[in-house]
Image: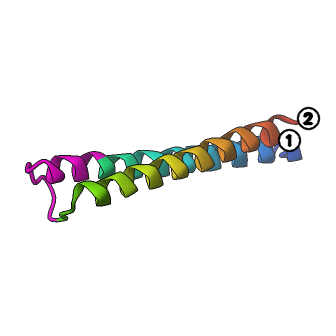
Amino acid sequence: MAEVSRTEIKKTMATSLGTAFGIVIGMIWTQVVLSAFNTVGIPLTTTGGTWSQWGIFVVTALVVTIICVVAIVMLSRWGGKQ
């Protein structure tokens, strides 16, 4: 059985965590879009809201996106080190 190096483990962990953060970004933006439809009167979900609530949701999604992207970049750099 081949020995697994620390570099391979770090690279795999960084890739996996980067993917997980990407999924989080996708999930939150899905909710933002569904909330927008609901706000304009096209209910695709059971949640409701006002324009101000939707605006707060968009800002929250942007903040989460920025945090996740920064984490992805940091993990990519960490996982790519030899």
Look at the image and give the residue range highlighted in magenta: 33-46
Residues at discs 2 and 1 in contact (Cβ within 8 Å): yes
Find out whether residue 39 is within the magenta segment.
yes
Residue at (13, 47) in percent of width and height: 40
Numbered badge on residue 82: 2
Extreme front residue here?
A: 52
In-front residue for pair 36/24: 36
Residue 13 lies, in percent from the top left, at 71, 49
**Quarter-wise, where is residue 33 in the image?**
top left
* Callout 1 crowding tier (Cα within 10 Å): few <14, some 14–19, many ≥20: some
Amino acid type, label 2: Gln
Q: Is residue 72 above or below residue 51?
A: above
Residue 57 lies, in percent from the top left, at 37, 56
Q: Is residue 26 above or below residue 77?
A: below
**Quadrant of the image containing the C terminus:** top right
Find out whether residue 60 is within the magenta segment.
no
Rounded to the nearest angstrom, the CA distance separating label 2 from label 1 is: 6 Å
In-front residue for pair 19/9: 19
Numbered badge on residue 28: none
Residue at (30, 54) in percent of width and height: 54
**Residue behind mark 1:** 7
Q: Is residue 50 left or right of residue 26?
A: left
**Quarter-wise, where is residue 80 in the image?**
top right
Residue at (79, 37) in percent of width and height: 77
